[in-house]
Amino acid sequence: MEKTAKRKIVSSRHLADGEGWEASEFEFGLIIAFNAFSRWMVKCMAAAGHTEMSHLEILVLHNVNHRGRDKRLSDICFLLNIDDTHTVNYALRKLSRAGLIESEKRGKEVFYRTSKEGASLCDEYRSVRERCLIDGLGRMDLSGEELSSIAVSLRALSGQYDQASRAASSL
């Protein structure tokens, strides 16, 4: 009996020929996961009570709320691994106009923190997340330790992509 070759599920067949085709398979999974995660954040935030936020604004709000520490634009961009400070700055302005964050100028730097309304919205998002996502994850055949291991691998792979982007910029 002839063994059937593994079918490659990739985003771009031309990138999956030869050695290293698994990277294209990983990238397709990453694309699908990123878009699903972005859609999830927007739907979760809408269920939490704020329907007009983009996934970037949601990420920025949660990052500003993280650990209750004031953050600068550069801190937020660094932690989210975003080079385009203009998009994050625009998100900060929108969040500020919505009353979800506050800012304070200290010398030449502007520091951001969540307002009471912003912190409350983050808490409501957490509640919706627990009901809709965390409960479902608990029913999957995936332990918390395995999920944590996947997160470590993704962070390590992000370093490979960052290094490759620097190499490509030097060509």
Image (cartoon, rainbow, N blue to C red):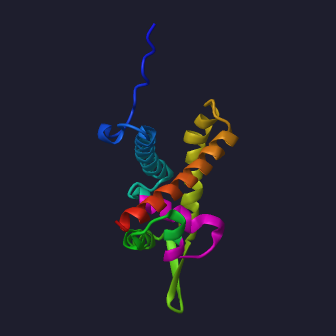
Compared with residue 38, is residue 60 higher up or lower down, i.e. above or below? below
Residue 49: x %, y % from top left = 47, 54
Quadrant assignment, res 56: bottom left
Quadrant assignment, res 169: bottom left
Q: Main secondary structure of the magenta part?
A: helix
Compared with residue 18, is residue 156 higher up or lower down, i.e. above or below? below
Residue 127 visible? The answer is no
Q: Residue at x 51, y 72 (%)?
A: 101
Residue 73 visible? The answer is yes
Q: Residue at x 51, y 86 (%)?
A: 109
The range drawn in magenta is 56-75
Residue 94: x %, y % from top left = 40, 70
Magenta stretch encompasses residue 59: yes
Q: Residue at x 46, y 47 (%)?
A: 37
Left or right position of 107 against 91: right
Residue 70: x %, y % from top left = 59, 76
Closer to us: 116 or 146 = 146
Left or right position of 122 against 45: right
Closer to us: 63 or 53 = 63
Q: Residue at x 49, y 64 (%)?
A: 81
